[in-house]
Amino acid sequence: MLVVMQAQATEEQVRAVCQKIEALGYRAHSMPGAQRTAIGITGNKGEVESGTLEEMPGVQEVIKVSKPYKLVSRDTKPDNTVITFPRANGASVSIGGPDLAIIAGPCGIEGREQAFTIAERVARAGAQFFRGGAYKPRTSPYSFQGLGEEGLRIMAEVRERFGLLIVTEAVDYESLDLVDQYADVIQIGARNMQNFSLLKRAGRAHKPVLLKRGISATLEEFLMAAEYIMSEGNYNIVLCERGVRTFADHTRNTLDLSIVPAVQRLSHLPIIVDPSHGTGKRNKVTPLSRAAVAVGADGLIVEVHHDPDRALSDGMQSLFPDQFDALMVQVRQIAAVLGRSIPVSTPVHSGAILED
């Protein structure tokens, strides 16, 4: 069920409706929009008796939401969700607005020198976020598993030095607690998209969540995974298409760009694209990045390494810094055609990156 408040409803009236919903034994999710506030109701096994709610001051109507995903649906929130990140210099960056979010960095944090070298280049090219794995869920138990908390500390230094916001993956409860402390965005990877207990825990975290699509997940399964997070009270979610497994063998995965407009039709959540995991091959990353921006994605998450042939993970799909520079030039041009932009960042002498 969904309670739609009148455009002129006061905060006190919204709060009163939420309290009434809670008193009935359900959970209320207040979601302000540009014109009016909607309040989603979860926890109900059947249909909620709407009569008492409809008569409350400030309520316009009570409607039934037929989709299994309720909070992520445009029925609940017609306006696009924009997640804003304040920065130390008083400016801010966002995911989901007119500006495209660019997240770049190595697959795994291998050491301080490696991270700083790559961070300096991606920041100079215009990335606003730095990605890097401190915890690496790998197919083989003998592959590089990440540096753990040491890697998180290195990324915190990257943020301090270059002004980049940090995106990194949590793989279990213990790592999620640490990522919540160190990072700006908690990534839930494809392997954990249907780890429902971890999704619930992410829903109680303090940071936005970047949720990657599972390797064989349908659109509805993808949105239902986001619903798990939102149902726990965390409404700051970024969806990410990173390729699905098909019969194709010319790429690591099949990058499904058709899901971008499909998500945007059904959900208010922003969606970005990962062309690195989506293809697994360096020469395909830039063309698919161009296509992702053209199809309307809200941003990109791209792997970059200064020496990919010696990378401890995913070197074959990591761009050289010069290739990332060229990619940024091209996607800026495509974004402009669509009336979107990538904020220009200017390095200062201290090594921090300040937004123009």
Image (spheres, rainbow, N blue to C red):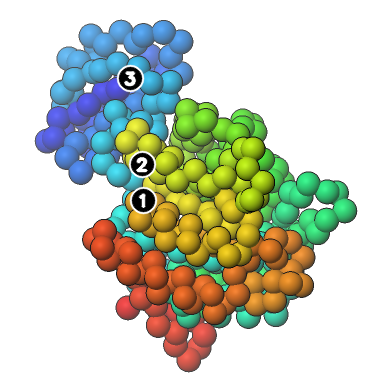
Seen from the viewer's position, the closer of residues 284 and 82 is: 284
Quadrant assignment, res 136: bottom right
Circle 3: residue type: Val
Task: Give the SS element for disc 2.
Answer: helix
Q: Which residue is mark 2?
A: 261
State the separation of the CA atoms marked 3 and 2.
Answer: 21 Å
Of the numbered discs 3 and 1, the one sitting upstream in the chain is 3
Tell which tag, 3 or 1, sits nearer the viewer.
1
Residue 65: mark: 3
For residue 128, what is the image quadrant? Answer: bottom left
Check disc 1 and report the residue beneath it.
295
> On the rendered image, what quadrant is the C terminus found in?
bottom left
Residue shown at the point (26%, 41%) measured from the top left = 79
Residue in the image at 18% along x and 23% along y: 59
51 relative position to 203: left or right: left
Whether residue 54 is visible, yes or no, is yes
When the figure is inspected, residue 216 is found, relative to residue 62, above or below; the finding is below
Q: Which mark is residue 255?
A: none
Q: Secondary structure at mark 3?
A: loop
Q: Kindly tell me whether residue 132 is visible in this rendering.
A: no
In this rendered view, identify the residue nearer to me: 173 or 292. 292
Question: Does residue 133 appear to the left or right of 32 in the view shown?
Answer: right
Q: Amino acid at mark 1?
A: Val
Q: Residue furthest bottom?
A: 349
Pick whichever, 14 or 275, lies toward us: 275
Q: Position of residue 309 (x, y in %)?
A: 74, 72
Q: CA distance from mark 1 to mark 2?
A: 7 Å
Q: Which comes sooner in the sequence, label 1 or label 2?
A: 2
Q: Are marks 3 and 1 in contact (CB under 8 Å)?
A: no
